[in-house]
Amino acid sequence: MLYRRTMIAAAAAFLFLAGAAARAADVSPNDTARFLAGMPPAADSPLAPLTRDRAWEHHAGVFDAAFGRLDHSQLVRIRAWSASNITAPRPTVFYMFSGPDFLYANAFFPNATTYVLAGLEPVGTVPDLTTLRGSVAGNLSQLRASLSTILSYSFFITHNMKFDLRAGRVNGTLPVLYVFLARSGKTIREVTRVKLDENGAVQPDLDSVRDTPTHGAKIVFAGSDGEARTLYYFSTDISDGGVRSSKFLAFLQTLAPGDSLLKSASYLPHSGNFSKIRDFLVGNSDAIVQDDSGIPLHYFEPKHWDLQPFGRYLGPIGVFSGRYQAQYASLFRKSHAIDFGIGYRWRPNESNLLLAAKTSEIPVAEASDRPPPEEHAERAEHASRHRAPQKVASRQRRAAPSQPSRSPFEWFHFGW
């Protein structure tokens, strides 16, 4: 009798575990993404009952309003700008210093088939959300907090992300990517954790051991056309020292040439410590869309690039005042208007956007013979005057414009 009861109990336990495993397997990445994005999952999804939770209903309402405002004021206008100005897009988009910002990568380059995003932020985890019944409210609240600045200002604050993306069971960049994919109208088909091997080839990251400096996620998704597309996010150091050992540039080379996006990049491409990723983008991009925090203007040789300025260049915000570019100011004296805001100067009437379109290939020897990196705006101005005297000889050097005494971004601490 005791033996029989023991066997029945064991069988019941096995069936319970099997049922739990089957339930978890039934929660697709797409249903998970929609749930996190405040959008209803499939009616037969194990997550569907959780949408009756008041915390999820509140979450959905907040996101509906926030993404609705963002689409109306920003994304729909960026898509219209892109359709008018990026007439021959490449299938690959390189978006360095991006964090998990698929939202703007897709808005500027909606027809790309491969997106590569990179930042220091960890990939993170998205557990089986059916196990969050007692903590749905806290995890969803934390997710909203991690997205608050990009939904309001078009960029992430690096200092905040260090904490926001590490809290709770739903953490890292993966849940943010899920939200942005779902809110961009995408259907997620497959999610794989990946890493780069010693040759820069993508391999499954089965155990996430720290034997490689480049961990990431590969997400296969589709838009309304049903075409399969791929998003890579890599958590990796793209400074010169970082890429020297990570093989990240070798991976990027397999996808080149492409187009590039640089936005709210902390002016790191101005630094001598990011020359390798800067030179890769200049050498392997057919078009580069950037604000002034991207690649300094004197790296775009006029014989190889057509430069089209949009918006207004008012100089960097106060915390970056040393990155003022007189050459940029001169170029933007004759710019085209834009009706959306972008970058650290996020108000529409203060934002600047540069479309650099390559007109001819840059010889390898010439690409490697670039000017030495400048650490200060004064040296950059001197270098640009030396390289193109006919264009700047008559320019008077201008001091960086004064900044407002109070800026919401003066307390930034950047993690690179």
Image (cartoon, helix red, strand yellow):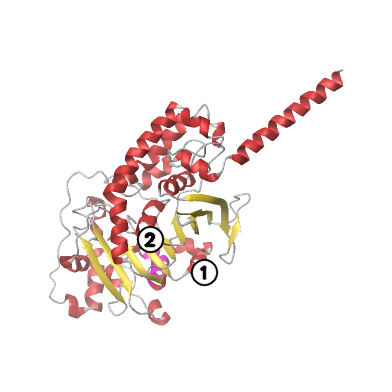
Q: Does residue 176 appear to the left or right of 45 in the view shown?
A: left
Residue 29 place in picture, x, y as percent: 54, 45
Residue located beneath label 1 in the image: 254
**Type of secondary structure dominating the magenta stretch:** helix
Q: What is the CA distance from the residue labelled 2 to the residue labelled 1?
A: 20 Å
Q: Amino acid at mark 1?
A: Thr
Quadrant for the N terminus in the image: top right
Report if residue 146 lies within the magenta region: no
- Asked if residue 290 can be seen in this view, the reply is no
Circle nearer the viewer, 2 or 1: 2
As rendered, which of 143 and 386 lies closer to the eye? 143
Residue 291 place in picture, x, y as percent: 28, 60
Report if residue 277 lies within the magenta region: yes
Q: How many marks?
A: 2
The residue at 22%/45% (across/down) is 407
Say few, some or many: other residues with alpha carbon within 10 Å of mark 1 (under 14 / 14 to 19 / 20 or more): few
Say few, some or many: other residues with alpha carbon within 10 Å of mark 2 (under 14 / 14 to 19 / 20 or more): many
Q: Does residue 415 appear to the left or right of 219 in the view shown?
A: left
Q: Which residues are magenta?
A: 272-282
Residue located beneath label 2 in the image: 109
Q: In which quadrant of the rendered view does residue 59 lie?
A: top left
